[in-house]
Image (cartoon, helix red, strand yellow):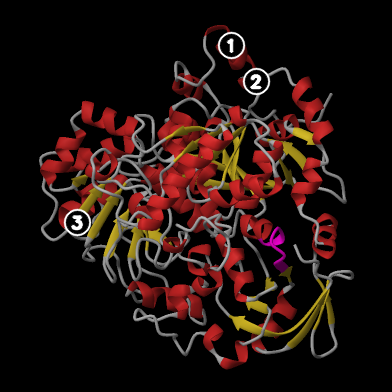
């Protein structure tokens, strides 16, 4: 996993609440057995018309979305299915952070394991971002702040462990494998099956 | 004396390999890891890349349900699986399980079924266990007093390699349900009403414990329906304290403890219910006696009303308007009497024997309306055999429905069982998201009783009219 310390990007705004992972990547694309190349299916049914052409009114199809790595979405982003294909599709598309006022638990956990930063903002800053699409923002993981173009810096919560993993590009599996002695001892102490 | 603990806290503490600190999450031990063909292949790939094996293959159990066909000739005959990618996914699971020593209930195994139906059915799911699966509806297993939650594929890999997960301790939410459910009102209506009340994000960060006399009076199938949809309220898990109903359900199941081990297990399980005075972070009270049959009208399970109700108005909410436009509905409109094209009875929410019995009770001696396509998909091959032994298959077939082999089927259409664009499907499944049952499909979530009533009339129908 690539370490992330600072992200700087214009935002792309999808002002929809309760975006479920079936929208992020529909189930018919889950028959894959790899994690690569899913960006082309990101928001497939919102991005493409039935004939496969891009819908010009969908925000990710608009020219100003090109190169943006930060998505601003409505409340409760990533609800529903646990499919990790959702963060795989978002990152393969080129996104590195999603900003919302609430993230679904499993999505948030999956995102952090794939170098996709869930930025949980309070209402006022979030509303400002919804109202100012294309705003230049800087997200700093050391200080866990998001800086708006107005210069205002807003704190966002991020657990120390998640921050450590993201900023050092550490994956959790290595950390867990390092706990083998404790797991051995737990297993041997436990009386029940 | 130790502080009183909730059911969740007892199970959590018992599985802490390393407790959480301010800087690090807990290392939580996993007793039972269920896997299926959709969310496991990339995790096996990581094991191969890192040269790792499974720490505890005997705690890992595989089946296939999402991509699998439901047509008998494709399951047991020579007809090939229609979708090439689905066929590849099925064969990759077979290959991975063989290579890593995982027990697999394969396509033609008599014990195969939807992963959340067969875990309890085989007695693998037990009170006090931690159960995970790369599938959000793992919350189902909490009905037996297990702590059961869905995980991503990276975490599937973590459990493969270490039998553990890194987890922050969730908060607790008690949902206290009291009062008797009225005739025609079921566990599905109850959970839909709960989601409508707390919202699709209302349980985020929490483990729900369903409590109260209404819950105690539910049988295990109904309890599983309730816990299954905990995730639709955003909850990490849903749990119900084990009691005599749970123990009677488990006794004699093939993977449940037997003889002396049973007595010892029972003693442990009886200690699991929350202590008197144990505190929850939040509590919500529900009056079950006031509930009616429920049906969704929008594109998430929280957009739900009593079946005779009117679609609410929410001015200044573009997402709500977009959702109604997708459904072809308008604020102030009633859903009752709206024409129905498809009826689906099945899924990990409502694919158990009592669900099929409920649907069959309304279809006995009746025909489904002309033009309605009704699909009945048992949750497991065992459910299918039990239903056939009671003659339920004949009731469905005689009424004009299709009777299939088990699987997730039309709940998410990965196997090609799809609702056509624009069609209205009354479905006993768990998600009415845009496109969930097929591109442009319009899903109305309801109970098996309501689904059967809608099939008979060809219109959205209150099942109490046909009882």
Question: Residue B265 is drawn in which quadrant?
Answer: top right
Residue A183: which quarter of the image?
top right
Read off the chain for label 2: A
Q: CA distance from mark 2 to mark 3?
A: 47 Å
Can see residue A70? yes
Which chain is mark 1 on? B
Left or right: residue B365 versus residue B239 is: left
Label placed on residue B261: 1
For label 2, the SS is loop
Quarter of the image with the N terminus of chain B is top right
- Measured from the top left, where is residue B305 in percent x and y? 39, 60
Q: Nearer the viewer, residue A17 or B284?
A: A17
Q: Are marks 2 and 3 on the same chain?
A: no
> Relative to residue B323, is residue B45 depicted above or below?
above
Q: CA distance from mark 2 to mark 1?
A: 10 Å
A115 within the magenta span: yes
The answer to the question of whether label 2 and label 3 lie on touching residues, with beta carbons closer than 8 A, is no
Compared to B373, does A56 lie above or below? below
Q: Choose the circle earlier in sequence order: 3 or 1.
A: 1
Taking the magenta stretch, the answer to whether it contains residue B425 is: no
Q: Which residue is mark 3?
A: B373
- Front residue of B155 and A177: A177
Label 1 near label 2: C-beta < 8 Å?
Answer: yes
User: Label 2, on which residue?
Assistant: A193
Q: Is residue B94 left or right of residue A83?
A: left
Mark 3 Cα-neighbour bin, 10 Å: few <14, some 14–19, many ≥20:
some
Q: Determine the residue positioned at 39% across, 67% down.
A: B435
Q: Is residue B446 above or below residue A126?
A: above
| Residue B232 place in picture, x, y as percent | 51, 54
Per the rendered image, the range of residues in magenta is: A111-118
Q: Mark 2 packing: few (<14 Cα in 10 Å), some, or many (20+)?
A: few
């Amino acid at each position: 996993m690539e370490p992330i310390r600072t992200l700087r990007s214009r935002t792309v705004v999808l002002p929809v609440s309760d975006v479920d992972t079936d929208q992020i990547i529909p189930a018919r694309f889950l028959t894959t057995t790899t994690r690569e190349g899913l960006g082309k299916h990101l928001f497939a049914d919102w991005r493409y018309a039935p004939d496969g052409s891009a819908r010009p009114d969908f925000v990710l199809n608009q020219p100003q979305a090109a190169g943006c790595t930060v998505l601003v979405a409505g409340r409760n982003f990533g609800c529903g299915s646990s499919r990790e294909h959702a963060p795989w599709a978002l990152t393969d598309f080129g996104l590195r952070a999603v900003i919302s006022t609430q993230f679904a638990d499993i999505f948030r956990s999956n995102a952090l394991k794939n170098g996709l930063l869930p930025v949980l903002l309070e209402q006022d800053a979030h509303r400002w971002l919804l109202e100012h699409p294309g705003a230049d923002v800087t997200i700093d993981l050391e200080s866990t702040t998001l800086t708006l173009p107005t210069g205002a810096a807003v704190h966002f919560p991020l657990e120390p462990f998640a921050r450590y993993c993201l900023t050092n590009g550490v994956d959790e599996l290595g950390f867990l494998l390092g706990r083998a002695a404790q797991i051995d001892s737990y297993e041997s102490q436990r009386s029940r099956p | 004396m130790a502080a009183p603990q909730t059911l969740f806290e007892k199970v959590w503490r018992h599985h802490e390999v390393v407790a959480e600190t301010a800087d690090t999450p807990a290392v939580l031990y996993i007793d039972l890891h269920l896997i299926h063909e959709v969310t496991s292949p990339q995790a096996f790939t990581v094991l191969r890349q890192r040269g790792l094996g499974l720490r505890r293959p005997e705690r890992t159990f595989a089946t296939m349900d999402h991509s699998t066909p439901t047509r008998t000739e494709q399951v047991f005959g020579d007809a090939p699986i229609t979708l090439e990618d689905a066929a590849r996914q099925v064969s990759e699971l077979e290959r991975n399980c063989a290579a890593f020593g995982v027990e697999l209930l394969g396509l033609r195994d008599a014990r195969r079924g939807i992963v959340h139906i067969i875990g309890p059915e085989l007695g693998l799911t037990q009170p006090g266990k931690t159960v995970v699966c790369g599938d959000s509806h793992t919350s189902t297993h909490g009905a037996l007093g297990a702590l059961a939650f869905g995980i991503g594929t990276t975490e599937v890999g973590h459990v493969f390699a270490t039998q553990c997960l890194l987890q922050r301790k969730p908060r607790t939410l008690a949902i206290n349900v009291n009062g008797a459910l009225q005739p025609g009102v079921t566990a599905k209506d109850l959970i839909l009403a709960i989601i409508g009340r707390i919202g699709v994000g209302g349980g985020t960060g929490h483990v729900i414990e369903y409590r109260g006399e209404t819950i105690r009076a539910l049988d295990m199938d109904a309890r599983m329906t309730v816990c299954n949809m905990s995730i639709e309220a955003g909850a990490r898990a849903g749990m119900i304290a084990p009691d005599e109903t749970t123990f009677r359900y488990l006794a004699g199941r093939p993977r449940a403890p037997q003889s002396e081990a049973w007595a010892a297990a029972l003693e442990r399980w009886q200690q699991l219910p929350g202590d008197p005075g144990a505190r929850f972070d939040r509590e919500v009270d529900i009056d079950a006696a006031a509930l009616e049959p429920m049906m969704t009208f929008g594109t998430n399970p929280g957009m739900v009303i009593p079946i005779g109700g009117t679609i609410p108005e929410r001015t200044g909410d573009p997402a709500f308007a977009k959702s109604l436009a997708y459904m072809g509905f308008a604020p102030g409109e009633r859903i009752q009497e709206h024409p129905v094209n498809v009826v689906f009875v099945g899924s990990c929410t409502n694919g158990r024997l009592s669900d099929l019995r409920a649907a069959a009770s309304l279809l006995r001696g009746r025909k489904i309306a002309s033009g309605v396509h009704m699909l009945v998909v048992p949750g497991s091959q065992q459910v299918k055999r039990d239903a056939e032994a009671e003659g339920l298959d004949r009731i469905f077939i005689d009424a004009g429905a299709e009777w299939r082999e088990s699987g997730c089927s039309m709940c998410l259409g990965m196997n090609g069982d799809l609702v056509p664009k624009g069609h209205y499907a009354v479905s006993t499944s768990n998600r009415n998201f845009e496109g969930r049952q097929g591109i442009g499909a319009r899903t109305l979530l309801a109970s098996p009783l309501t689904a059967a009533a809608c099939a008979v009339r060809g219109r959205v129908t209150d099942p109490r009219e046909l009882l």
